[in-house]
Amino acid sequence: MKSALFVAVAASAALLSLHAGEAEDRLKAAVAKLTDASGYTWISTTDISGAPMRLSPTTGKVEKGGFMVLSTEAFGSEIEVVRKGTNAVVKTDDGWMTAAELPQPNFGGGGVPNMGAMMGRRLLSSKPPGEEVDSLLRRLGPLKAEGDVLSGEFTEEGAKEYLKESRRGRSFAEPKSAKGGIRFWLKDGVVSKSELNLDTEMETPQGSMSLNSKTTTEIKDVGTTKVRVAPEALKKLGL
């Protein structure tokens, strides 16, 4: 009896592992179709409960082997990033700047934080959705599929690593704990939408802080997107 039960449990575990592998293969194939397209557009919206400010949506456009342009608003100002390869420039109220020229946000320095610089650095650390999935997969447990919706949960270490990577270049307290997951929607074999949820607890000088964030990304105009770059940005990039 025990032997039969063991065999049944082992078979069930093997079946779940097979399904998880199939879901991951589907996601990788859907991402490959996205990144192989001539270009695409996406809009990301992040809602953070418990945060002192609300982030504006970010719009991104990318062409294969060409430019990526990201734009958002912060405190009435438009902030834009133009990137080609490893070179990038940021447009702020003070004009176009390289990452090295961008002022530090000045958190905790006794002055008023430079929110434009903070948002500029946030955009500089962003990746197009096709590239983002690779770093996410390394930090997720087994994927599962329900029709054209694929989902997975972060490991705790994976959630912390993802937070650190996504906040690179910005000053935030280290997370005490983090958990969450992500869902991907597929349409015609291509990733069309994702929803990432994270619950984080951090220790700050003011005490413990709990945050819940939800980032929804919708992808459109796959294969028809064209990227236009401002002449001032091209000049700053040396192109």
Image: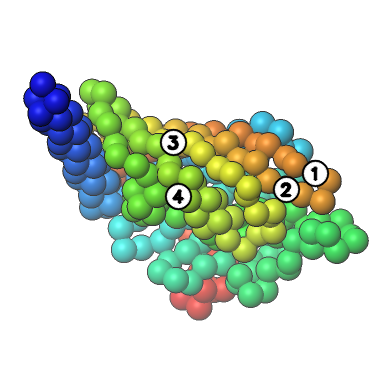
Q: Residue at x 65, y 54 (%)?
A: 174
- C-alpha separation, residue under disc 1 versus residue under disc 4: 24 Å
Q: Is residue 190 left or right of residue 111?
A: left
Per the model, the C-alpha gap separating discs 2 and 3 is 22 Å
To which residue does mark 2 refer?
Answer: 203
Q: Is residue 238 left or right of residue 37?
A: right
Q: Can I make out residue 78 in this image? A: yes
Which residue type does callout 4 highlight? Gly
The type of residue carrying mark 2 is Glu
Number of the front mark, 1 or 3:
1
Nearer mark to the viewer, of 4 and 3: 4
Instruction: Give amino acid for label 1.
Output: Gly
Crowding around mark 3 (Cα neighbors within 10 Å: few <14, some 14 to 19, many 20+) is: many
Label 2: which secondary element:
strand
Q: Residue at x 61, y 70 (%)?
A: 99
Q: CA distance from mark 2 to mark 4?
A: 19 Å
Q: CA distance from mark 4 to mark 3?
A: 10 Å
Determine which residue is flagged by label 1.
207
Q: Quadrant of the N terminus?
A: top left
- Side of 98 where 151 appears, left or right: left
Residue on which the image places disc 4: 158
Q: Are marks 1 and 3 in contact (CB under 8 Å)?
A: no
